Every structure is written in structure tokens, then in C-alpha cells.
């Protein structure tokens, strides 16, 4: 009996050692820029070629009710890499694109900080748009390596931030300005991502690949311009840039497989918000499908985005999840999946592990809040509780339908109408009051950093 107990204990001990020695997974967090709600083939688009992201969905999990934490770039990106509401992360709106302007506070802890503290090599590639001072650029925010532009957008060949003056160059490696005149930035991003991944190392890595595509300027490659020549403008220009985006993602993911790293790498993908209807995108080009709204709007088309996660052999493959989830959720979920120590961290996002593993799991979000744009007395905000969603001072950038004075409080039941065309506020004043009170409590809480 003693021998049997000792052998059993030894087996348990050896098992624990083996488990402890299993390598932690690598992580690639990919954030697209201004990609429309349904603008991937796997989301129902019939006129776009997106084989790389479709393949990622086939070997992973695709969400149908996934929300960006904001309908504009900087706050959504802050939430993606901090696990916090943008307001609590210190980025309630877009950050200045001018050098010398701070953005996300240095004190805000990012995925870079957390993964580095857990023994990971950390890298950033692409767009930052979260600060332009040493403390608030990527190397000051937990990323040991960084390559990309710090402002909101650049010309992809000259690397100049150009749409309000003065024109200025914006390309940096580890805080030092560099020049790659005439080289196509999407290709440079793919090269830098692969350079980071291929580095010899004895530890896992985290790569935050913050794409600047398909954000304007719409500069797809000649291959894809020819492919979409029969489409009408502006869909034609936008589609070429979407497929260019998909192609460079595919180059990196294919190399990941060739390097035999795919099975031990978690890949997360989402868009930072809905598509743009700005003049610089020729007034549109993206597609929100049945959803009202676009970038800058808290209607579904501005915040409901494509989102995919894959970890072959560890997470379900070819799965679809209809539970509500958000951009704030990735970091706490990755903490769980990677077994990281985050005892000193609190998140506004939720751990989605149960949802990833089961379509029957309940969404961890009883309520979720947004606030973005508008003046002090005309703030645009939204709150969703269950299927009820209330938008204050709504902005319909898609111009799908006119908004009247009585629509200052716009109530929708998403189980009845995902189109958000009928305002139910007058029919359900008690629900309006309840959701307003919830939002007042929330904004008071997140504003007290």
C-alpha cells in the first residue's frame, strides 16, 4: 500500500513537472483599421476575396456579436491592448497625431507590460495612434520592439501624415525616425512582423500588429485593383485595400505554419470599428450589411465588427459564437489561456474562455457601455443590457435614415430589429430611465481614474 501511494504521488509530481514545463503559447494580436462589419467573405461578403482571414476563421472561432469599445481609432485601440474601457484607460477620444503630444497615460498597463512581466518578448508593428512622446510611444508602453507610424494615418509610400498640415514624415523604429522612401508600408509591416517572429529566442513572444489598413488613403496593390476593376467606386478602391490587407496577413500566417509555430500560437483578429464614410474614402466603400451606422456612430455599423480567434488543437475549429463580446475582453482572455500572472491587474473586459469552448455558455456581459464624441451637453453614448440598447444623441454616419429631435434618446431591442430604424423610446420610458441611470453610474465610475 505504501509503495502504491508513493508511486501514485510520484506520478502526480512528474505530471505537474511536465505541465509546468510546457511552453506558454505565442500570441499575435491583429487589429484592422476601418474594416466594415461584414467585409470578409466568411462574414457573408460576396464581392470580396479574403482567403487568409476566412482560413483563420475555419481553424478557429468567429464571433457574430463582437463589439469594438469605441467607434473611432485611438480609444478602440487603447481598449484592445489594455482590457479597459477607453475612458478608464485614459483615451476617451482620438489622440493627436502630432509629435510631442502625449496620449494614453504612461500609468495605463498594456498587453506589452503584462506579457513582458510574464517572460515574453514583446513587439509592436504598424499604427500606434496612442501618443507621440517617449513615454507614450510603444517602447514606453511595454513593447520592447516597435516599427511603424505614431499618428492616425500615413501615405503608404512616402510615410507622410498628410491630411492636415504641415505635411510631416512619420515612420519610426524604437523611437528613432527612419526613412524607407517609396517602400509600400503594408509590405513593410509584413516584413517586420516576420522579422520579429523569426528571431532566435528561448521565450514566447507577443506581437501586437496594429494594421493601418484598409483605412484611407485607399492604396491597394495593382494586383487587387485589376481584380476589382468591374466594381463601382468607391467599393472598388476599398475592396482592393481589403484584399491587400488579407494578403499580407496571409503571408505572415503562412510563414508561421512553415516555421512550425502555428500550433503553439494564439492569433486574435478584429477591426477597430466600422468602415469610414469620410470624404477621404470617397464617401464610403465599406459595408455594414444589415446594420445602421459606420465609423463615428454608436449604431451597430459603427461598433459591431469582425472578430476571430484561433489556437489549433486547443480551441474549437470552424466554430461560430453568437454571444456578445468586446475588444476589452481579449487581454483577460489571453491571461487565462496563457496562464499569466495578473494578480495586480483588474480589467473591464471579461474572460471569454468559457464562451470560446462552448456555444451554450452565457455571455459574461450583463451590461456594456460606450461614450464617444459630441460636446459636453451633446455627448454620444450607448448602453446595451441584454437585447436592449439605448443610444443618446445618436450620429448616423451611414445616413440610412433621418434622425429627428425626438430621437435624442434612441431605444432598440436588437432581438426584434438589428436594423435600428425604429425608435422605441416613447413606448418603453421605464427602460430608457433604467439604462440612463446605469450609464450615469458607469461614467461616474470610469471617470474617477
Image (cartoon, grey):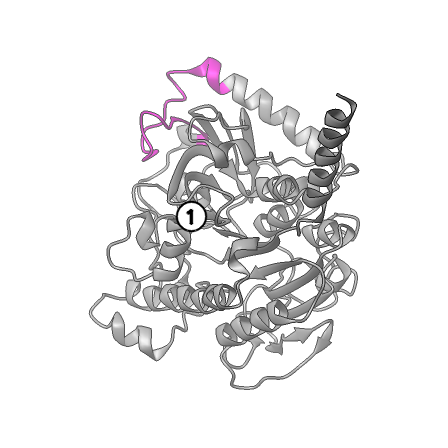
Vertical placement of residue 340 versus 390, above or below:
below
Dot 1 surroundings within 10 Å: few (below 14), some, or many (20 or more)? Answer: many
Vertical placement of residue 229 versus 288, above or below:
below
- Tell me residue 102's x, y (percent): 74, 59
- Tell me residue 58's x, y (percent): 37, 50
Q: Viewed as shown, does residue 152 lie left or right of 111?
A: left
Vertical placement of residue 170 versus 391, above or below:
below
Query: What main secondary structure does the magenta stretch of the protein show?
Result: loop
Q: Viewed as shown, does residue 166 lie left or right of 356?
A: right
Q: Is residue 277 visible?
A: no
Please, which residue is most extreme toward the bottom here?
Answer: 181
Count how many numbered circles sit on residues in the image: 1
Range covered by the magenta-colored residues: 408-432
- Tell me residue 11's x, y (percent): 70, 35
Residue underneath mark 1: 306
Q: Is residue 105 visible?
A: yes
Vertical placement of residue 56 versus 379, above or below:
below
Question: Residue at 78% of width from left, 23% of height from top?
Answer: 2
Question: Residue at 53% of width from left, 57% of height from top?
Answer: 30
Which element is circle 1 on?
Answer: loop
Q: Residue 349 is drawn in which quadrant?
A: top right
Amino acid at each position: 500500500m505504501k509503495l502504491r501511494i508513493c508511486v501514485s504521488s510520484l506520478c502526480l509530481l512528474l505530471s505537474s513537472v511536465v505541465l509546468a514545463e510546457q511552453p506558454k503559447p505565442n500570441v499575435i494580436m491583429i487589429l484592422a483599421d476601418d474594416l466594415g462589419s461584414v467585409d470578409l467573405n466568411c462574414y457573408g461578403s460576396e464581392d470580396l476575396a479574403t482567403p487568409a482571414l476566412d482560413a483563420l476563421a475555419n481553424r478557429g472561432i468567429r464571433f457574430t456579436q463582437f463589439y469594438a469599445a469605441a467607434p473611432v481609432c485611438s480609444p478602440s485601440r487603447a481598449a484592445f491592448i489594455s482590457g479597459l474601457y477607453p475612458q478608464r484607460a485614459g483615451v476617451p477620444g482620438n489622440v493627436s497625431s502630432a509629435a510631442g503630444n502625449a496620449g494614453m497615460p504612461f500609468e495605463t498597463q498594456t498587453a506589452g507590460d503584462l506579457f513582458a512581466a510574464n517572460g515574453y518578448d514583446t513587439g509592436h508593428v504598424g499604427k500606434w495612434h496612442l501618443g507621440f512622446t517617449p513615454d507614450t510611444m510603444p517602447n514606453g508602453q511595454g513593447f520592447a520592439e516597435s516599427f511603424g507610424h505614431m499618428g492616425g494615418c500615413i501615405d503608404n509610400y512616402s510615410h507622410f501624415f498628410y491630411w492636415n498640415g504641415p505635411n510631416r514624415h512619420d515612420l519610426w523604429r524604437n523611437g528613432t525616425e527612419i526613412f524607407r522612401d517609396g517602400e509600400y508600408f503594408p509590405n513593410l509591416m509584413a516584413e517586420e512582423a516576420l522579422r520579429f517572429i523569426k528571431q532566435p529566442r528561448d521565450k514566447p513572444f507577443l506581437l501586437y500588429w496594429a494594421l493601418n489598413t484598409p483605412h484611407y488613403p485607399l492604396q491597394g496593390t495593382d494586383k487587387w485593383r485589376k481584380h476589382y476593376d468591374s466594381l463601382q467606386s468607391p467599393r472598388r478602391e476599398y475592396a482592393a485595400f481589403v484584399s491587400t490587407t488579407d494578403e499580407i496577413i496571409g503571408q505572415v500566417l503562412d510563414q508561421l505554419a512553415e516555421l512550425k509555430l502555428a500550433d503553439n500560437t494564439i492569433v486574435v483578429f478584429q477591426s477597430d470599428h466600422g468602415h469610414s464614410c469620410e470624404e477621404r474614402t470617397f464617401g464610403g466603400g465599406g459595408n455594414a450589411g444589415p446594420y445602421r451606422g459606420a465609423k463615428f456612430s454608436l449604431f451597430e455599423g459603427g461598433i459591431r465588427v469582425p472578430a476571430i480567434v484561433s489556437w489549433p488543437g486547443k480551441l474549437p475549429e470552424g466554430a461560430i459564437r453568437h454571444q456578445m463580446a468586446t475588444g476589452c475582453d481579449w487581454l483577460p482572455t489571453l491571461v487565462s489561456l496563457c496562464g499569466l500572472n495578473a494578480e495586480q491587474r483588474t480589467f473591464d473586459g471579461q474572460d471569454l474562455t468559457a464562451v470560446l469552448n462552448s456555444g451554450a455558455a452565457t455571455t459574461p456581459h450583463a451590461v456594456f457601455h460606450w461614450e464617444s464624441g459630441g460636446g459636453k451637453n451633446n455627448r454620444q453614448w450607448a448602453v446595451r443590457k441584454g437585447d436592449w440598447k439605448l443610444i443618446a444623441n445618436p450620429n448616423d454616419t451611414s445616413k440610412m435614415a433621418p434622425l429627428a429631435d425626438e430621437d435624442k434618446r434612441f431605444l432598440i431591442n436588437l432581438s426584434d430589429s438589428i436594423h435600428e430604424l425604429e425608435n422605441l423610446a416613447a413606448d418603453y420610458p421605464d427602460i430608457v430611465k433604467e439604462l440612463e441611470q446605469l450609464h450615469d453610474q458607469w461614467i461616474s465610475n470610469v471617470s474617477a481614474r
